[in-house]
Image: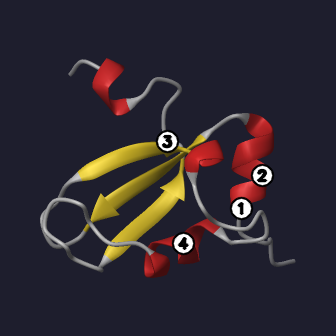
């Protein structure tokens, strides 16, 4: 049985963030799902096709559901 990808709406309902990674410059960020301009039905894996890196302008963006409980800036190695 094939499972469906997580949607932006699921992240919003669960109060989670979208992890965004630029494959060109390696910048990463976590964006609250409530701040995203996407429809609730937008699958998380394809959201990157509609995004552009704010650092380098690259369009090769990988998106995934929030990976950790704390935001990137709150984690220490």
Q: Which residue is mark 3?
A: 67
The quadrant of the picture occupied by the N terminus is bottom right
Residue on which the image places disc 4: 47
Q: How packed is label 2: few (under 14 Cα within 10 Å), some, or many (20 or more)?
A: some
Disc sitting over residue 10 in the figure: 2
- Numbered tag placed on residue 58 in the rendering: none
Disc nearer the start of the sequence (3/2): 2
Q: CA distance from mark 2 to mark 4?
A: 13 Å
Sequence-wise first label, 1 or 3: 1
Which label lies toward us, 4 or 1?
4
Residue assigned mark 1: 6
- Give the x, y percent position of residue 22: 26, 65
Q: CA distance from mark 3 to mark 2?
A: 14 Å
Mark 3: which secondary structure?
loop
- Residue 43 x, y percent position in the rendering: 67, 71
Q: Residue at x 49, y 42 (%)?
A: 67
Residue 53 percent across, percent down from the top left: 26, 66
Q: Are marks 2 and 1 in contact (CB under 8 Å)?
A: yes
Q: What color scheme is it?
A: secondary structure
Vertical relation: 16 (above or below) 46:
above
């Amino acid at each position: 049985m094939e499972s469906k990808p997580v949607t932006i709406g699921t992240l919003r309902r669960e109060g989670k963030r979208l992890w965004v990674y630029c494959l060109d410059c390696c910048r990463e960020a976590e964006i609250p799902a409530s701040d995203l301009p996407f429809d609730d039905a937008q699958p998380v894996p394809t959201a990157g096709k509609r995004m552009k890196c704010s650092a380098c302008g690259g369009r090769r963006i990988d998106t995934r559901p929030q990976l950790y409980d704390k935001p990137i800036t709150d984690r220490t190695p």
